[in-house]
Amino acid sequence: MLKRALKSALGIGLGTTIGMVIIPRIMDSNLNKIYPPIYVQAVVQFVGSYIVAFLVYFSLDYIKTKKQK
């Protein structure tokens, strides 16, 4: 249950990091002047989205196993 949630959250974390940090910076170069360095923003975005996705997947698995018992 824990291992499955950790693996599933990885894809969500990477996807949101690419979609919310990398792609906008490539499309609009003015963002590089306004926002913090891309690596800082990417790390913060990845960690935040990974934690939220992990909690969602873990709670769904937890509810699913409690329902079966």
Image (spheres, rainbow, N blue to C red):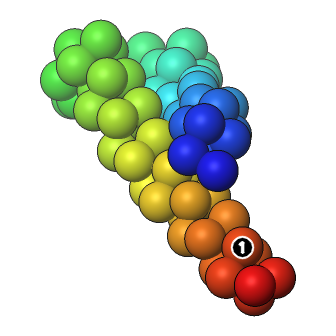
Q: In the image, what residue occupies the spot 22% across and 29% down?
A: 35
Image quarter of the C terminus:
bottom right
Going by the image, does 16 lie left or right of 67?
left
Query: From where the camera sits, is residue 9 visible?
Result: no
> Which residue appears farthest toward the front when viewing the image?
69
Looking at the rendered structure, the secondary structure element under dot 1 is: helix
In the rendered view, tell whether residue 50 sits above or below residue 59: above
Q: Is residue 21 left or right of residue 14?
A: left
Residue 19 percent coordinates (x, y):
61, 34
Instruction: Look at the picture and state if 48 lies above or below 67.
Output: above
Q: Position of residue 38 (x, y in %)?
A: 32, 15
Of residues 15 and 19, the one nearer the viewer is: 15
Residue type, numbered disc 1 = Thr
Label total for image: 1
| Residue closer to the observer: 18 or 2 | 2
**Residue at 51% from the left image edge and 50% from the top image edge:** 54
Task: Determine the residue positioned at 40% across, 47% down.
Answer: 51
Left-right relation of 29 to 2: left
Residue underneath mark 1: 65
The percent coordinates of residue 10 (x first, y second) are 59, 31
In this orientation, which residue lies closer to the viewer: 16 or 26? 16
Please state the horizontal and vertical placement of residue 1, each as a whole percent of the image. 64, 50
Quick one: label 1, few (<14), some, or many (20+) residues within 10 Å? Answer: few
* Residue in view at x 74 percent, y 76 percent: 64
Depicted 10 relative to depicted 66: above or below: above
Q: Is residue 2 visible?
A: yes
Left or right for 28, reference 9: left
